[in-house]
Image (cartoon, rainbow, N blue to C red):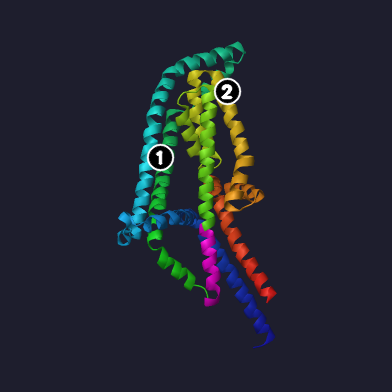
Amino acid sequence: MSERSEQRSLILYGVAMALCGIVLMYAVYLLRAALLTIYVSVLMAIVLSPAVRWIEHRHFFGKKHLGLPRWAAILVLYLMFVIAVVALLAIIVPALISQGSQLWEQLPAYQVQLQEWLAKHGMNSAWTKIMEELPTAGSAVSSALGVLQSVAGALGAIVTILLLPYYLLVESTTLEHTWLHLVSKEHRPAFARMTQNVTIKVGRWMSGQLLLCLTIGCTASIGLWFIGVPFFYVLGLIAGLGELIPIVGPLIAAMPAILIALTVGPKAAVFVVIYFSVQQFIEGSVLVPRIMERQVGVTAVTVIVALLIGSELFGVVGALLAVPTAAIIQVVLQEFVSRDHAQAAH
């Protein structure tokens, strides 16, 4: 083959690879929602695998042959999750309904107080402007339909995230063998070690997240009790659960506390806003970096950068997945660095 023909072949190969890369990136972009759902499901399976293994190897009545099969151990774990959710709802919902109805009855009085306060400070036009900017019936219906569509899509994703980990856990042995057989024999020990380290890291991330929820829930309950807000234990529980959703989760969880504080008085509501603001500042700048560094082994700088990048790329879901993703990337990089060092030593 002549030199010109070889150059032409290289150019054609380069153009073909570039086109394939563009097509692949476009396909990933089109499938980003499905791929993100699959990724979340895989993380859920990794998080649940130690608990499933523990239940699976329990010997009931002291007899070895009475241990649960894997599918039954997974169902037991799912059943425990459902019972926990139902118990939480039984605690939270009645209190919220009671306080919400009281707040609804007092809304006219709050409206009158707001109008009087605006009139006292010469801002009557502000109330008129607020009323004019309220959505019309048509726009409200359109917004409601959009919300319902988003909720339906979210429910579909949630169902998938709940079902797919079950099958991933049931077939985990087969999937692991398939994964290892995709690489050469000399690299299989490294890949097995990397998989084990990823499982450990993601499990520790979940334990760190639960520790954050417990810390926020307890401190929120204490703060609300000190301010004098009723049902402080329920509101603290909501605040702790809101910690599972980065960025907007704490804001959403703070709203019931603020609304219930309004039933006590405007001053109590202001104190609640200040308290939650300070709590979230400490949580974001101190607790999250330190706890995740200790539990997952990811530095505080890495946690903050991962949260910024994840939230920018995928919003709330990206922020939620930022820390475990950073931990997985860290495991992969450490494996490659240690392998390079071992090769250099030889």
Q: Which residues are magenta?
A: 185-199
Badge 1 crowding class, 10 Å Cα cut-off, few under 14, some 14 to 19, many 20 or more, is few
What numbered label is drawn on residue 53? none
| Nearer to the camera, 113 or 281 | 281
Q: Nearer the viewer, residue 42 or 36?
A: 42
Residue at left offset 34%, top offset 53%: 75
Q: With 191 as the anchor, is 106 left or right in this view?
A: left
Does 247 sit left or right of 4 as displayed? left
- Residue topped by disc 2: 270
Q: Which residue is mark 1?
A: 148
Q: Secondary structure at mark 1?
A: helix
Q: Position of residue 131 (x, y in %)?
A: 51, 22
Q: Between 125 and 113, which is closer to the camera in this rendering?
A: 113
Res. 87 image quadrant: top left
In the image, residue 223 above or below residue 196 = above
* Separation of residues labelled 1 and 2 (CA atoms): 33 Å
Indicate the amino acid at tag 2.
Answer: Val
Q: From the viewer's perspective, is residue 320 above or below residue 20?
A: above
Q: Amino acid at mark 1?
A: Leu
Q: Secondary structure at mark 2?
A: helix
